[in-house]
Image: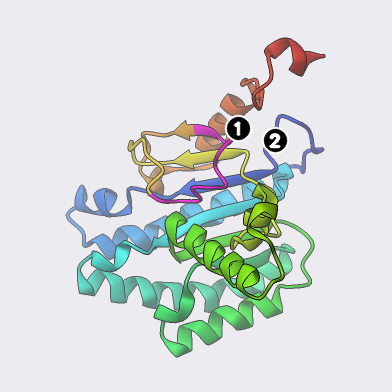
Amino acid sequence: MAKKEKNNCIPRHVAIVMDGNGRWAKARFMPRLFGHKKGVESVRKVIKYCSDAGVECLTLFAFSSENWKRPEDEVSGLMSLFMGVLEKETVGMLRHNVRLQFIGDRSAFSAQLQAKIALVEQETAQCSGLKLIVAANYGGRWDILQAVRTMAGQVQCGELKPDELTEAHIGKALSTQELPEPDLFIRTGGEQRISNFLLWQLAYAELFFSEKLWPEFDEKCLQQAFDAYAGRERRFGMTGEQVKA
């Protein structure tokens, strides 16, 4: 696909909950991890399509803070999958000028995985194309809580007064502090909820829910989401007449 010129019909920041890997595998009488591995193919397609379309940021919800409750074999398989993907995909990210960044509490991961994450972030830090943000061991409430703790420390040290706190202070303390807020939120798998993902940041995002399970989500499905986004009027509290003016 030829690279498109940036325009208002293309979201600047796309955030995706990649749901349905397990159900896709179960329907084929395969273990859930098989579905997660198949889902990596959809990740590649979406990254390339967003990069070619001129999307600035793509945030993927890879592993929530609640996902630790899943069966132990699935969790350990996902950790191995993360490591394998990082090892295999780094060269491709560098070739396509993709910068990788992780958000979430990575302290729960093995030392080996933490080191690999840090290394790939460092290796791609100079890439100036698509910013790929992977949310792993992430939760929206955790994100807000750690921001509150940061600001509480600033107040305690006298760096900030309580009555001076603004929304901008909160935004700068979140894990996405250097990123624009998402314009388009996509969830696959037929579910219609946010599931503790980017709770503060999604305040004005356009929501798009797809019935497709994540391994079935391809470039055509993504373009449908972009088309739906392009057809919506984003008013941010104003009237339609004010927006047009």
Q: Is residue 23 above or below residue 185?
A: below
Q: Which residues are magenta?
A: 196-207
At label 1, which amino acid type do we have?
A: Phe
Q: How far from the left and from the top, in percent, is residue 213?
A: 35, 43
Q: Is residue 153 above or below residue 209?
A: below
Q: Secondary structure at mark 2?
A: loop
Quadrant of the drawing holding the N terminus: top right
In this rendered view, identify the residue nearer to me: 178 or 36: 178
Q: Secondary structure at mark 1?
A: helix
Mark with earlier residue (2, 1): 2
In this rendered view, identify the residue nearer to me: 175 or 114: 175
Residue identified by numbered label 2: 10
Tell me the number on the disc at residue 226. Answer: 1
Q: Residue at x 29, y 71 (%)?
A: 75
* Image-based side of 220 in relation to 101, left or right: left
- The residue carrying pointer 2 sits among few (fewer than 14), some (14 to 19) or many (20 or more) residues within 10 Å by Cα, namely many
Residue 1 visible to an observer of this rendering = no
Q: How far from the left and from the top, in percent, is residue 54?
A: 74, 44
Q: How far from the left and from the top, in percent, is residue 240?
A: 69, 13
Q: Residue at x 27, y 54 (%)?
A: 22
Callout 2–callout 1 Cβ contact below 8 Å:
yes
Q: How far from the left and from the top, in percent, is residue 243?
A: 75, 18
Quarter residue 10 falls in: top right
Q: Residue at x 48, y 62 (%)?
A: 145
At label 2, which amino acid type do we have?
A: Ile
Residue at the far top: name it: 241
